[in-house]
């Protein structure tokens, strides 16, 4: 063979080997242009264990490439010296308002789901959110409470506070239902699941007089459809009988009987000082194969209506709370104010301080057990923001200084990282990020295929990312001044689109996408 031909063949072979890269794998084109590149951050993927400085190339809303070299893109976000993590997934948000979504984005949340309370009608919820455009990803369960109230009152669920759970007036008085009533409720929930609901939300604690057979039936319906229930347990009392321990035992018994997946909401506030006993039994149940999952938020106070069933009459004392343990607008209530509001304005939102973790070491240890429970998710239970005493759905930004909500609506995830990772080093960063992203995704992914692409940083995963400074991430919202967004969050990317860039939110950006089970044709 002539020398020139041989040289040409060898040259072509060398080029081919360069293109193939090590072990014959195709090498990425270093000149490829991505829609977005997150450059030079410490990328942490809680699933694979990746923890290193990388560039992330995003194309068409998905992660296309993770590389140790510098990538080219039409837009570059500098993450040098910062943590790049999967966007936080909040399984428990009632703040389904533009203001609430934007505040949560400042806390690193890229997906917020209304699962405990749920909505009705479900199709209307998704249509409304899509028409308005949403900053972060959204989704909801079907509301058992609204289905039951609609049937008892004989009105469409849309007329019950717009199909949401902002008001449950009269629900606490619901008793056991007839088989005919429950069949009508079942049909409503079945239609909602057909429309793509993520499961069934069961506000059992807001109607503790309803039948135990009904609760079991709801879970049987959910199990038959292969979806979870999201339960606020029946009792909050700390004293027997009918206390929080008994309430959680009911959920474990139903999980055993139905074989269904029961997700138990806010175990920190639902169990109170009985949390160590409750969590020990949940751990044993999980070890025996029961499909029971949990969530918690890093605060020692909850928020609900002052007329809630678990604060009425003798239940208040049995809950371990005194009237002076409640605050409104950052100020402690007197016993006289508490009685007046329960009588005249039972829907008034208050904050109940069930633990004092900042001053009582024993209470702090109890809260820690809920937050650090293995396999448990961090979830905010964010409540909607009020301005001038009313929940607002206005397109208002920045957050008004007089806006009111529980501080967990603004600071849950940054507080968790500040307190438990940076300050107390009670949990490693990768395990902490699993609690905010991977674990919530896994809780849902068995019935919601979309969630298999969330909570991870890997090729073909959804490009929902949060970039933050571990040295400065912190919650600023307090009970007295809740309208303060978190700090230390540098960039928030939703579906490959920057929503927050260099700490500033773009109020015109609406990249949020629905999280929805595939509706029936």
Image: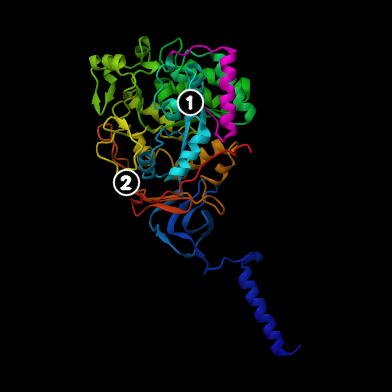
Q: Mark 1 or mark 2: which comes first in sequence? A: 1
Check residue 175 for magenta coloring.
Answer: yes
Q: Is residue 450 magenta?
A: no
Q: Identify the element where label 1 is drawn.
A: helix
The structure residue drawn at horizontal position 50% and vertical position 14%, both measured from the top left corner, is 210
Q: Which residues are magenta?
A: 173-201
Which residue occupies the foreground of this view, 147 or 100?
147
Q: Is residue 391 visible?
A: yes
Marks 1 and 2 sit apart, C-alpha to C-alpha, by 39 Å
Residue on which the image places disc 1: 157
Residue 229: x, y in percent?
A: 54, 27
Residue at x-position 52% and y-position 45%: 454
Q: Is residue 370 above or below residue 433?
A: above
Residue 433 in sight in this render: no
Label 2 Cα neighbours within 10 Å, binned few <14 / some 14-19 / many ≥20: some
Residue 370 picture location, percent across and down: 43, 29
Residue 487: mark in rendering: 2
Front position in the image: 488 or 153:
153
Tell me if residue 25 comes above or below residue 119 in the rendering: below
Quarter of the picture containing the N terminus is bottom right
């Amino acid at each position: 063979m002539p020398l020139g031909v041989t040289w040409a063949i060898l040259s072509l072979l060398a080029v081919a080997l360069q293109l193939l890269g090590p072990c014959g794998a195709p090498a990425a084109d270093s000149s490829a242009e991505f829609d977005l590149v997150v450059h030079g951050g410490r990328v942490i993927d809680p699933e694979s264990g990746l923890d290193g400085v990388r560039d992330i190339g995003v194309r068409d809303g998905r992660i296309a490439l993770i590389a140790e070299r510098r990538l080219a893109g039409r837009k570059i976000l500098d993450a040098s010296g910062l943590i790049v993590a999967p966007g936080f997934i909040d399984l428990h948000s009632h703040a389904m308002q533009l203001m609430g979504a934007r505040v949560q984005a400042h806390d690193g949340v890229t997906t917020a789901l209304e699962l405990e309370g749920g909505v009705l009608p479900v199709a209307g919820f998704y249509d409304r959110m899509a028409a308005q455009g949403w900053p972060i990803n959204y989704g909801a369960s079907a509301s058992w409470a609204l289905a039951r109230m609609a049937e008892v009152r004989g009105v469409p669920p849309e007329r019950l506070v717009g199909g949401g759970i902002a008001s449950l007036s009269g629900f606490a008085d619901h008793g056991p239902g007839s088989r005919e009533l429950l069949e009508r409720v079942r049909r409503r929930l079945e239609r909602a699941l057909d429309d793509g609901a993520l499961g069934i939300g069961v506000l059992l604690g807001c109607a503790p007089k309803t039948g135990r057979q009904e609760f079991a039936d709801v879970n049987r319906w959910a199990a038959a459809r292969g979806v979870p229930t999201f339960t606020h347990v029946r009792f909050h009392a700390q004293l027997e009988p009918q206390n929080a321990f008994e309430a959680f035992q009911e959920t474990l018994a139903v999980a055993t009987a139905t074989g269904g997946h029961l997700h138990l909401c806010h175990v920190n506030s639902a169990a109170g000082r009985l949390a160590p006993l409750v969590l020990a039994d949940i751990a044993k149940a999980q070890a025996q194969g029961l499909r029971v999952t949990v969530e918690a938020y890093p605060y020692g106070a909850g928020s609900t209506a002052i007329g809630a069933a678990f604060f009425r009459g003798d239940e208040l004392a049995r809950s371990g709370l005194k009237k002076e343990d409640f605050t409104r607008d950052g100020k402690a209530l007197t016993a006289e104010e508490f009685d007046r509001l329960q009588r005249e304005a039972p829907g008034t939102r208050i904050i109940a301080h069930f633990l004092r973790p900042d001053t009582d070491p024993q209470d702090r240890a109890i809260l820690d057990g809920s937050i650090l429970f293995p396999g448990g998710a961090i979830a905010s239970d964010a409540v909607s923001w009020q301005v001038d005493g009313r929940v607002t759905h206005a397109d208002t930004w920045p957050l008004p200084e007089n806006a009111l909500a529980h501080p967990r609506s603004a600071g849950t995830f940054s507080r968790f990282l500040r307190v438990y990772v940076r300050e107390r080093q009670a949990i490693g960063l990768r395990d902490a990020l699993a609690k905010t992203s991977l674990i919530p995704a896994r809780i849902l992914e068995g019935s919601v295929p979309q969630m298999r692409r969330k909570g991870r940083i890997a090729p073909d995963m959804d490009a929902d990312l949060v970039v933050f400074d571990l040295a400065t991430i912190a919650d600023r919202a307090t009970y007295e001044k809740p309208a303060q967004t978190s700090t230390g969050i540098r960039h928030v990317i939703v579906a490959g689109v920057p929503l927050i860039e260099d700490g500033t939110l773009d109020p015109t950006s609406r990249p949020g996408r629905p999280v929805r089970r595939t509706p029936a044709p």
